[in-house]
Amino acid sequence: MRGPLRSALTAALGLAGVACASAAPAPVAPARTEASSAPAVTLSPALASAPPPTPAASAAAGPAPALSATAAPAPSPPAKASADAPAALPASNDGLARGTGEPADRELALGDAAYDAEKYKEARAHFRKAEQLAPKDAAPKVGLVRVSVAEADLPLDYAAAPRDPRIAGLLKQLDGALKLDADFGPALLERGHLLLIQGKAEMAESSLVRAAELMPRHAEAQSAVGVALMALGKAKESLPYFERAATLERDSPERLGNLGAAYLMQGRTGDAVTAFERAAQLAPNNARFQSDLGTAHLANNRLDRALPALERAVALDPQRASYFANLSYALQQAANLDRAVATAERATQLDPKLGSAWLNLGTARAKRGELDQAEAAFKRAQALDPEDPRVKANLEELAELRRKKSGPP
């Protein structure tokens, strides 16, 4: 598996457009910005990556919908990581070699090195040789799966490839490895990864929890449990795993990004800002971390800091619709309705299926008094998701605006 899996928040709510389209509507953040030339408007724009709703949020918004599944109770999570805790436990690496010096293990070490260098043909040859030398060892089989995943260039986001036909065969290979050693941590981790990519968090949870128990110093094993728990709606339970992963790899922007997303889901906006700021410092040209940071600043009511981060995200990745949608939201908060409309329009052009973009376009147009155009935008959002409570609330508000504008009969 090349690189860490993204947090479930990014997958379920599209945080920073995180790399996967929202599977469910994001909560509505309240907005009360008014344009002096337009009638009073209380319509709520929508973040493509929204923080949890506050008590002041529109009642129509409701809580962020969670991916529901009946999962076995999670075991006691690792102890909460302290921001001041020393890095006493260095993270373990991903290598499959055990350092025994035996012929099969030497092949595993060569395979690990080739895999890390992205020389997959060489890695496959070494893992196959190791398998021939030690046919009852699970490690070479896991190495071969890793190579296949890397060569297939599978997306690493949660639920990013639910129907990819290649995954079933890879899972079968891992099941074969686990028959040889049911407690081989790397096999359990890879199995959980593939199930998460399929969107099967409930099935992934048990494998990943066991992998994390067996590999307590492996940052990705800890983080992957957090992803599974978040996808199952267990945001509170996921947080200690993300904290532990970030402690094990303190200078990993990906770990910090996942941790920030988990904090944001818990309403800990200050902690989220701190995590995203550090991620953005470590990867200053990564658009996702800039957008995540801007979203956290919005949740923390710091529009002055949110706008520069969201503007930078758009500049770094001008093809990501959700970044434009979030910037449009912020521009509405700043009462810059002309730019908000233009930015939301750009988001709809980049991704006509992004509901939050149409909602933002509708609210911005309504605030400019363009009620017909606003209704058309809301109708587009409604066609994408007829059950989205944001659409219903905004259409009702729009109807009330029309009645007020027309005056008494």
Image: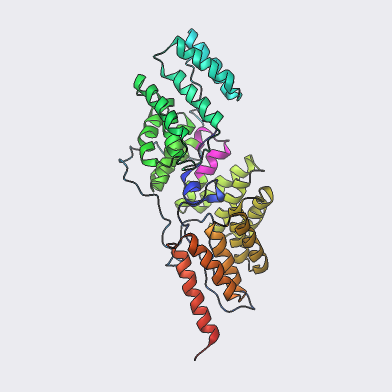
| 105 to 368, vertically: above or below | above
Q: Position of residue 294 (x, y in %)?
A: 59, 53
Q: Position of residue 201 (x, y in %)?
A: 39, 41
Q: In the rendered view, tell whether residue 94 sits above or below residue 255.
A: above
- Residue 98, x across and y down, in percent: 47, 16
State the residue lying farthest toward the right.
315
Question: Is 251 colored magenta in this rendering?
Answer: yes
Residue 198 lies within the magenta run = no
Q: Residue furthest front?
A: 165
Q: How is the image coloured?
A: rainbow
| 382 w.r.t. 141: above or below | below
Of residue 382 and residue 257, the one placed in the foreground of this image is: 382
Q: Residue at 50% of width from left, 35% of height from top?
A: 247
The residue lying furthest to the bottom in this view is 409
Q: Nearer the viewer, residue 194 or 266?
A: 194
Q: Which residue is drawn at the image coordinates 52% and 47% (left, top)?
A: 20
Q: Is residue 300 visible?
A: no
How many numbered marks, from 0 up?
A: 0
| 385 w.r.t. 158: above or below | below
Magenta residues span 246-259
* Residue 9, x across and y down, in percent: 48, 48
Magenta region's main secondary structure? helix
Residue occupying image coordinates x 41% and y 47%:
235
- Residue 41 visible? The answer is yes
